[in-house]
Image (cartoon, rainbow, N blue to C red):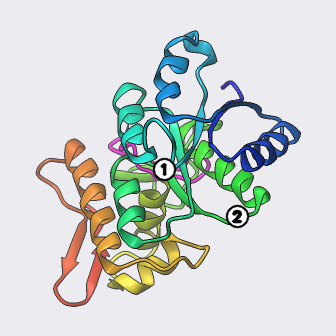
Amino acid sequence: MNDNVLIVEDEAKIAELLRDYLSSSGFTPHCLERGDQVIDWLDAQPPEALPVMVLLDLMLPGLDGLTLCRRLRERWPNMAIIMLTARVEEVDRLLGLELGADDYICKPFSPREVIARIRTVLRRTHPVTPAPDTGAPESSPLVLDHDGWRALADSQDAGLTAVEFQLLEVMFNAPGRIFSREQLMDHMYRDHRIVSERTVDSHIKKLRKKLAEIWPEREVIHSVYGVGYKYEPLI
């Protein structure tokens, strides 16, 4: 895995701060200040030099961050994306994640927190240890690789985001237990951000869809009307 990280941020002081912290943390940062520069810049890079991570501001000149996030996900589906923004409205957070962002950090933020979140996302998108590390029996149809942040359904990677993995992990570790949306939110966002119950429903929907691509006729995540969700292992 290369160590290139692209910072797309039009506030020079923030971009410089992130660049300095990334450099001191072993990454190779690159900075762009306009959204409409990004696609052309990426197209000019050799495949082996494409960034493993994009730190993407929401409000950008030329092309906004949400539109750019969608285009990046269409062209480079394996490229990790963390959105940075001062707009904390729930609709922006939900929309950003639905467009394919792996994480979402609100300004003002600690640069150390950003580095920690980058490493967390990269552990999932670029796992170092391929062998699963799980408490489930090896014969289990669903195995969680905690080192790689992967869910393996019949040995196939379900391609979960970091939030989806955490959501599944909470229920997986307590099969049959019903979790309320509030309980799931506490585990999904450990920085105690305020989100709506609709956010949980959105992630559950995407989680189910990804598992259904592997198991079209099997279901492990069940809704409990008026209460929440639970995980029921396959026999």
Q: Is residue 232 left or right of residue 63?
A: left
Which one is earlier in the sequence, the residue at label 2 or at label 1? 1
Q: CA distance from mark 2 to mark 1?
A: 17 Å
Magenta highlight on residue 159: yes
State the residue in front, 141 or 24: 24
Q: Position of residue 42 (x, y in %)?
A: 53, 20
Can you say whether 48 is above or below 6 in the image? above
Quarter of the rendering occupied by the N terminus: top right
Q: Is residue 57 left or right of residue 181?
A: right
Q: Which residues are magenta?
A: 144-161
Res. 102 mark = 1
Foreground tag (2 vs 1): 2
Q: Position of residue 48 (x, y in %)?
A: 60, 14
- Residue found 53% across the figure and 61% down from its top: 135
Res. 109 mark = 2
Res. 22 mark = none
Q: Position of residue 67 (x, y in %)?
A: 36, 41
